[in-house]
Amino acid sequence: MPDRKTIGVLALQGAFARHIDVVKSLGVSTVELRDPDDLPGINALIIPGGESTAMSKMLVRWGLIEPLQKLIKGGLPVFGTCAGLILLADRLKDWDALPRLGGLNITVARNAYGRQLDSFEASLNITIPGSPEFSESAMEGVFIRAPRIPADSVGSGVEVLCSYDGFPVLVRQENILGAAFHPELTGDNRLHEWFLREIINP
Ligand code: GLN
């Protein structure tokens, strides 16, 4: 893995620290991204879980929405998890006016797993052609007040890499990868490795 790449981890709010630990453990350097001045130094971006409404406010306050949209349209690799997935969705089921980045041709329903299922773990069978490491064993996904992607909302250009209980939970559209769960919490780093290998250094 070349270590000259630098991964920006959006560090405005939420669960960014574990993503930084995972990326560093894979031998790649990171930058905590808070300011548009940090953008020229990054080769990819991770948007962590947290609270999408709070992150949205800070993206607006720090003037990050437009520069990031431009970079993502230009091909910057992005991995959004949970709240990060919400911020990357082209459509939100409720409160579609939430300022965000977009880019994924999907609809997302926030907090849609209901109260009893506020948090849960699930064994996820990820299928990615050409990446046999995912068929060796399931990945544990931690879902925390997770967003839900209605299967019929997945538009053209989006590949569903994993579904759980009939709902897509891992999707990719070219340079954008989105997970409804938290892949940084279990110590199973296959998805981060795959993002670094296949999306950043294809
Ligand atoms: N419920 C949160 C939101 O709507 C997302 C939760 C998470 O990122 N774990 O932003």
Image (cartoon, helix red, strand yellow):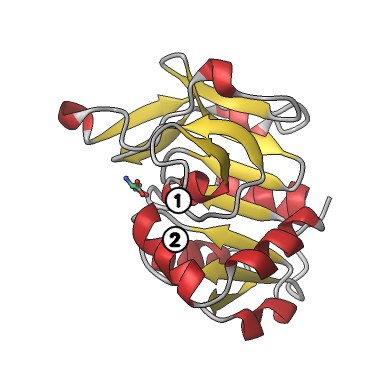
Q: Residues within 10 Å of mark 2 (few under 14, many from 20)?
A: many
Q: Which residue is mark 1?
A: 98
Q: How far across and down, in percent of the image, does residue 112 sit? A: 32, 29
Q: Which residue is mark 2?
A: 56
Q: How far across and down, in percent of the image, does residue 11 sit? A: 46, 72
The amino acid type found where label 1 is placed reads: Leu
Between the residue at mark 1 and the residue at mark 2, the CA separation in whole angstroms equals 7 Å
Q: Are marks 1 and 2 in contact (CB under 8 Å)?
A: yes
Residue 164 placement, left or right of 160? left
Quadrant where the N terminus is found in the figure: bottom right
Of 94 and 32, nearer the camera is 94
Of 188 and 191, nearer the camera is 191
In the rendered view, tell whether residue 110 sits above or below residue 167.
below
In the rendered view, tell whether residue 110 sits above or below residue 45.
above
Question: In front: mark 1 or mark 2?
Answer: 1
Q: Secondary structure at mark 1?
A: loop
